[in-house]
Image (cartoon, rainbow, N blue to C red):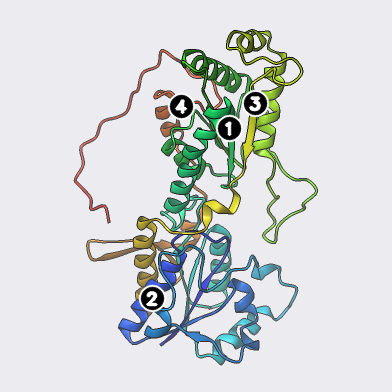
Amino acid sequence: MNLGIITSGGDCGGLNAVVKGAAKAANNLGIKIFVIPNGYAGLYNLIEFDSLVELSVKRTEEFSAVFAGSEAGHSRVKIKKIDDPIKYERIKEGLKKFDIDGLVISGGDDTGNVIVDLLNQGIKCVHAPKTMDLDLQPYSVGGDSTINRIASFVFDLKTTGKTHNRVIVVEVFGRYAGHTAFRGGIGAEADAILIPEIPTDFDILYKDVKTKLCKRIKENDVYAGTYTIVVAEGMKDASGKEIVDETAGLDSFGHKKLAGAGKYVCQELNKRFGKDIEITKFMKETKLYVKGLYEIPEVREVRPGHLVRCGKSSAFDVNFGLQIGGAAVILLKNDIYGVSVVDVKNGKIRYMKTQDAIIQRHVDEKMVSFYEKLGFCFGRKVNDDEKIDFELLTCQPERYL
């Protein structure tokens, strides 16, 4: 049996672990596995290659499972959109040229949609879930690494925020699901977290910013304080308006290019600071006020961008990536395809249909409500008298990994 491995979509932590897990499992089972480079662009152009890199034992040792990104490379190409009437025949000819019997493909929902498309054309694929957005039904490799990096950046930015008495607004990836902003913000103890699932009422957000920032600065013996906000790029205001770059057009999968959410938050807060006479009084009381130069607290935007998806993978994502990469190979060896690996536990590989796995999953509003009661702001009105109330269930313990 010969297999090909493809990684597609955005880069993130744990991907090299998927590649390495698949390679090590293949080597253990006497299966040859080859890199099809640069995502679906490589698959479409496979017929043009003279040779492919085999992930032999020696070649697999040449890269680290801990590095984020992918040794196999990426591209954002949707096969259906290729303007070529014989594109599927071309892909099949490429696979035939290298005697490839099946594909291990790691990616998110866009990648998964292409997998379903390829399956309908008779091409055997197993999906290793990957997306830092965490919006697939099963856990996807890359999420934990990104959450840890977001939390680290937001926490570190509190030092500059407190030094300058600034409101720090950190905009992060995530499109229309706010998992990484949500979990990263909680992990850094950010004051406010703005996610697509909860439309932001800026009057409510401003009230929280003003109350907490002014209190911290007033009560500090050297008048120092900060307020941190994590913003998901796909956030919406109270009217449901999303913040997009209208000049950028659509990406190759037909998505609007989101841009400017962090900047928009800064503008909305600055407008309210500028009109609030109580802020002028506060600035004077704390000896911060300088007419014409420093009349309101500073609001600064930071966009870590691709820094949240590069560098080093978390230990959890290395573990998970190795597992699902290896599991994908085992499934193909057993002639099981058209599925996404869910996890490997207790000697069992669990999987589900790829078309079900790629249904978008959003942040659980009950968890948002839970953290609101712990004092986090999500830009919406909260009943202060409402207490934490969860259904209590007994259950059997489950192994963590």
> What is the residue that sits farthest to the right in this orientation?
247
Quarter of the picture holding the C terminus: bottom left
**Element type at marker 2?**
helix
Q: Position of residue 277 (x, y in %)?
A: 68, 8
Q: Relative to residue 125, is residue 272 depicted above or below?
A: above
Amino acid type assigned to the residue bearing label 4 in the image: Phe
Q: Give the mark nearest the N terminus, 1 or 4.
A: 1
Amino acid type assigned to the residue bearing label 2 in the image: Val
Quarter of the picture holding the N terminus: bottom left
Amino acid type assigned to the residue bearing label 3 in the image: Glu
Image-quadrant location for residue 80:
bottom right
For image coordinates 73% across by 21% down, the residue present is 293
The answer to whether marks 1 and 4 mark residues whose Cβ atoms lie closer than 8 Å is no
For image coordinates 46% across by 42% down, the residue present is 151
Q: How far apart in space, not on screen, are marks 1 and 4 (Cα)? A: 15 Å
The answer to whether marks 1 and 2 mark residues whose Cβ atoms lie closer than 8 Å is no
**Element type at marker 3?**
loop
Label 3, on which residue?
A: 298
Q: How far apart in space, not on screen, are marks 3 and 2 (Cα)? A: 53 Å
Label 4, on which residue?
A: 376
Label 1, on which residue?
A: 168
Is 112 left, or right, of 238 in this rendering?
left
Closer to us: 168 or 124: 168
